[in-house]
Image: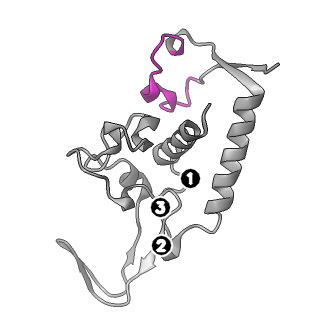
Amino acid sequence: MEFEHLNRVMNEALRFECPASSATGVTLLEDVQLGKYHFKKGDVILNFLHGVHHNENEWQRPYEFIPERFDHTSKLSLNSEGKKRSPASFIPFNGGMRVCMGKTFAEANLKVFLTYLTQSFNFEHVDPIFQAGEFPYAHFLQSAAKPILIKLTLNQ
């Protein structure tokens, strides 16, 4: 698996199932007007990351697992109106001053682990639904009730 494709799969997995459900809350020090919403001093605002990563205005087909949306040459990398997505539409580790301290460590570990797995093993789907030419991404992470069976064989 090429590195860029591995990166796209990793980013899509982080978008699809974010490691945290929400970012750290921010307590307002004064009254604030955000668009049509008014917040008072002392209110706590949370950023709901699952909602950000599944926003239909920013993501085409947001409830499908499509790694190609992280390929800047793909039409799927654009928002639902065909424009460039907001940088704040993908924040699995939050961002700015509140970025997760473990972000770099987690990303490095994911890359090393996934590279090791893909170089050491051959993966084969046991379920025939996954063997039919086109991979059904939407089915990939839908249900824990029915496990996805994969046969691993050691690379020679």
Q: Nearer the viewer, residue 139 or 97?
A: 97
Q: Nearer the viewer, residue 146 or 61?
A: 61
In this picture, is 113 found above or below 108? above
Residue type at tag 2: Gly
Q: Which mark is residue 134?
A: none
Q: Residue at x 70, y 38 (%)?
A: 115
Range shown magenta: 130-146
Queried whether the magenta region covers residue 95, the answer comes back as no
**Which one is earlier in the sequence, the residue at label 1 or at label 2?**
1
Residue 148 point in image, percent of width and height: 59, 23
Q: Nearer the viewer, residue 84 or 10?
A: 84
Mark 1, mark 2: which one is toward the viewer?
A: 2
Q: Residue at x 20, y 46 (%)?
A: 81
Horizontal arrangement in the rendering, residue 77 relative to residue 70 (left or right)? left
Q: CA distance from mark 3 to mark 2?
A: 15 Å
Q: Quadrant of the C terminus?
A: top right
The crowd level at tag 3 (other Cα within 10 Å; few <14, some 14-19, many 20+) is some
Residue 8 point in image, percent of width and height: 51, 41
**Which one is earlier in the sequence, the residue at label 3 or at label 2?**
3
The residue that mark 1 highlights is: 19
Circle 1 SS class: loop
Circle 3 SS class: loop
The residue that mark 3 highlights is: 22
Q: CA distance from mark 1 to mark 2?
A: 18 Å
The residue that mark 2 highlights is: 96
Residue type at tag 1: Pro
The crowd level at tag 1 (other Cα within 10 Å; few <14, some 14-19, many 20+) is few
Queried whether the magenta region covers residue 134, the answer comes back as yes
Circle 2 SS class: helix
